[in-house]
Image (cartoon, grey):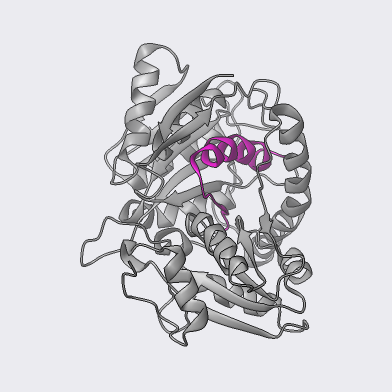
Amino acid sequence: MNVRILTGNESAAYSAMKSMVRVVAAYPITPATPVVETVAKLVESGEMQAKMIRVESEHSAMAACIGASTAGSRTFTATSSHGLAYMHEMLHWATNARTPVVMAVANRAIGPGWNIWADLSDALSQRDTGWIQLYCSGNQEIYDTIAMAYRLAEDRKVLLPAMVCYDGFVLSHTAMPVEITDFEGFLEEYNPKWRLDADNPFTHGNILPPEPFAELRHNIQKAHDRALKIMKKIEDEFYEFTKRETPLIIEEYRTEDADIVIVTMGAIASEAKIAVNSLREKKVKAGLLRIKSFRPFPEKDVKNYLEGKRVYVFDRAISPGSGGQLFREIRSALAFSDVKSVVPRVVGIGGIDVTKRTIEKAIFERKIWIKEVVA
């Protein structure tokens, strides 16, 4: 077994190498910079057989990834916060062009004022671009999920780009043991059904009339619907390949007999498990439902696990004027279900620590927005 101590950023870079990525285009931004720094070292040393493209902006990085993917290469990039925001136009382009780019996103707050700490607002503000969005809660999971994301994104019934998201600094700069797996056999070299080829030129119409454009968007929605079924299959195949249980859709913890279920995403879920155990010791029947796949959103699974429960949704982001994005999705999914209540909680904004005491306090107090640092 090859185990190394890696940060979340290094885990992303090593997974890209082992996933046989052939083109990386990136522009550095905190806290995602070490991803591309590590990739650059791996390429320079010859360990990673890839072309590293150094561009002048994140917008250009995504444009280069789209071009490389269209030409038939497996592509990868990494970014965060304002870098992701700068890519916004090209994120739509990547989806509509059906390019299976995979991107690591070290989640960070959006300014001003300038804040470099963990907050899921950057990725969640891109939720309508059509990208698959997967939120990790540990460094081994980051490593595993990038390979699984390529299997999903490149499936010919899906063909969509994917973000692999993880909390900035909380995971991006924290070192943990990571088992390094060679993914050859689980992944093959990328071989798209069609590609742009200078030796076999053809053209596409640049302007799309209303009816074909509507069909294009409908097909993207159907691809997301199909993705949920394919994700379950990939989970099983990944376990057979690695003997590691890595969720792609959801993770449940002690929900079967729970009266109270905490629902959250990302690194907060790891602390929520500790809170669940602490609440159980206090004779409170608590459980956890971690949403790994925010897009596509697993509505049916959410209903199955939360039926008849009292639900507390913990968001590390907020859509001003609406509330926590995850809370809105959960409440919508449970609109016609037999649920006792769905209670919103906003925690950890701008990188404020979220401890088990924060979570317990948020359950037993009536405050919706938990902005205090709880020791």
Tell me if residue 343 comes above or below residue 174 in the rendering. below
| Residue 57 x %, y % | 29, 44
| Residue 204 x %, y % | 59, 43
Residue 201 sits in quarter: top right
Residue at 67 percent across and 31 percent down: it is 192
Find the residue positioned furthest to the left. 113
Tell me if residue 71 comes above or below residue 225 in the rendering. above
Q: Nearer the viewer, residue 130 or 288?
A: 288
Residue 166 visible to an observer of this rendering = yes
Residue 52 sits in quarter: top left
Residue 316 visible to an observer of this rendering = no
Tell me if residue 294 comes above or below residue 374 in the rendering. above
Residue at 52 percent across and 48 percent down: it is 163
Q: Nearer the viewer, residue 124 or 143?
A: 143
Horizontally, is 165 left or right of 154 in the view?
left
Horizontally, is 15 left or right of 234 in the view?
left
Any magenta on residue 260? no
Quarter the N terminus occupies: top right
Q: Nearer the viewer, residue 116 or 44?
A: 116
**Residues rendered magenta in the picture:** 130-155
| Residue 118 x %, y % | 36, 57
| Residue 167 x %, y % | 42, 52
Horizontally, is 359 left or right of 301 in the view?
left
Residue 156 sits in quarter: top right
Any magenta on residue 146? yes
Quarter the C terminus occupies: bottom left
Q: Nearer the viewer, residue 369 or 149?
A: 369
Residue at 62 percent across and 67 percent down: it is 280
Find the residue positioned furthest to the top. 46
